[in-house]
């Protein structure tokens, strides 16, 4: 009888796990990166574009979105600003990533301005921007690129789909439809209040985590959480709750690097890490 009871308990756990496959986790606040300049400075920028960790330099690179004269900050692992207040992005930045093959920081710009790379000086400060891919190699003018090092691809969110581009700017494969708020094998929402659409999410930004089965990350601004989806089928696998004071925005201001999610507070002009 004991063996039968244990078998039923184990079997029940498997069924329960299969029916409710979404993992829930509470994220905790980590370091912050205070962007240079103030809101009253000349060309300060308003929205954060992205944060990227350089594993060789052991530094964070954070940029503002919207203009080549907007600030960029270089920070050490503790969040200390290392670059000058006058450092600019010198690119109309949207996405930023560390290319593991080239061992350099790259990014995509607004509209058809192309993709670029940074040349760093001996201290790891950007001193030159080079456009290595011209034209509009993205689905939308404000698309924020996310890099998948395993497949050497750049990913973009466009409506209900994630699109995949090779590093030579060619769209590859089939777009992945995202099943907003729905786990695989889950029942349909009981009413419309439980139904989620692309309008309930940050529409410029997808992040790539590299976590198996939870590779794609999005901000659900309706429910106030970060959600992770399987890159194979586009179904929800994890819900990550945030502290009540976390900043959630419908455009930009969201990034992932060095194993942490980053949210930008436009009033305080700070990127905050969550893990």
Image (spheres, grey):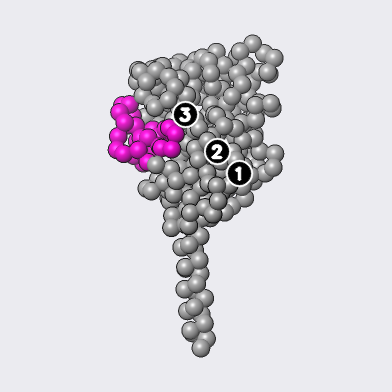
Q: Which mark lies nearer to you, 3 or 2?
A: 2
Lower position in the chain sequence, tag 1 or tag 2? 2
| For residue 230, above or below residue 166 | below
Magenta region includes residue 52: no
Disc 1 from disc 2: Cα separation: 8 Å
Instruction: Check disc 3 and report the residue beneath it.
Output: 144
x and y percentages locating residue 240 in the rendered image: 58, 48
Residue 27 is left or right of residue 117, and the answer is right
Instruction: Check disc 1 and report the residue beneath it.
Output: 223
x and y percentages locating residue 20 in the rendered image: 51, 60
x and y percentages locating residue 235 in the rendered image: 44, 49
Q: Are marks 1 and 2 in contact (CB under 8 Å)?
A: yes
Disc 3 from disc 1: Cα separation: 22 Å
Instruction: Check disc 2 and report the residue beneath it.
Output: 200
Q: Residue at x 35, y 18 (%)?
A: 135
Main SS of the magenta part reads strand
Q: Are marks 3 and 1 in contact (CB under 8 Å)?
A: no
Stretch of the chain drawn in magenta: 148-176
Q: Residue at x 44, y 30 (%)?
A: 145
Q: Nearer the viewer, residue 68 or 144?
A: 144
Q: Is residue 74 visible?
A: no
Residue 137 is left or right of residue 50, and the answer is left
| For residue 184, above or below residue 222 | below
Q: Are marks 3 and 2 in contact (CB under 8 Å)?
A: no
Q: Residue at x 61, y 21 (%)?
A: 46
């Amino acid at each position: 009888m004991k063996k039968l009871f244990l078998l039923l308990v184990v079997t029940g756990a498997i069924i329960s796990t299969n029916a409710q496959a979404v993992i829930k986790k509470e994220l905790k606040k980590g370091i912050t990166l205070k962007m240079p300049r103030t809101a009253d400075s000349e060309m300060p920028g308003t929205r954060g574009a992205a944060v990227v960790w350089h594993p060789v330099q052991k530094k964070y690179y954070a940029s503002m979105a919207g203009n080549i004269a907007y600030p960029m900050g270089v920070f050490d692992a503790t969040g200390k600003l290392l670059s000058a207040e006058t450092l600019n992005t010198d690119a109309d930045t949207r996405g930023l990533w560390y290319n593991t093959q080239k061992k350099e920081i790259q990014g995509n710009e607004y509209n058809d301005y192309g993709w670029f790379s940074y040349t760093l000086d001996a201290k790891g400060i950007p001193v030159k921007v080079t456009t290595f891919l011209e034209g509009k190699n993205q689905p939308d003018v404000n698309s924020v690129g996310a890099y998948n090092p395993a497949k050497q691809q750049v990913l973009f969110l466009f409506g209900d789909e994630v699109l995949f581009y090779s590093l030579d700017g060619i769209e590859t494969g089939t777009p992945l439809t995202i099943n907003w708020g729905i786990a695989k094998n889950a029942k349909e929402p009981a009413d419309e209040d439980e139904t989620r659409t692309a309008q309930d999410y940050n529409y410029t930004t997808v992040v790539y985590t590299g976590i198996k089965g939870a590779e794609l990350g999005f901000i659900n601004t309706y429910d106030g959480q970060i959600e992770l989806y399987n890159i194979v089928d586009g179904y929800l696998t994890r819900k990550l709750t945030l502290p009540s004071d976390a900043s959630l925005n419908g455009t930009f201001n969201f990034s992932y690097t060095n194993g942490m999610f980053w949210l930008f507070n436009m009033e305080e002009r700070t990127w905050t890490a969550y893990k």
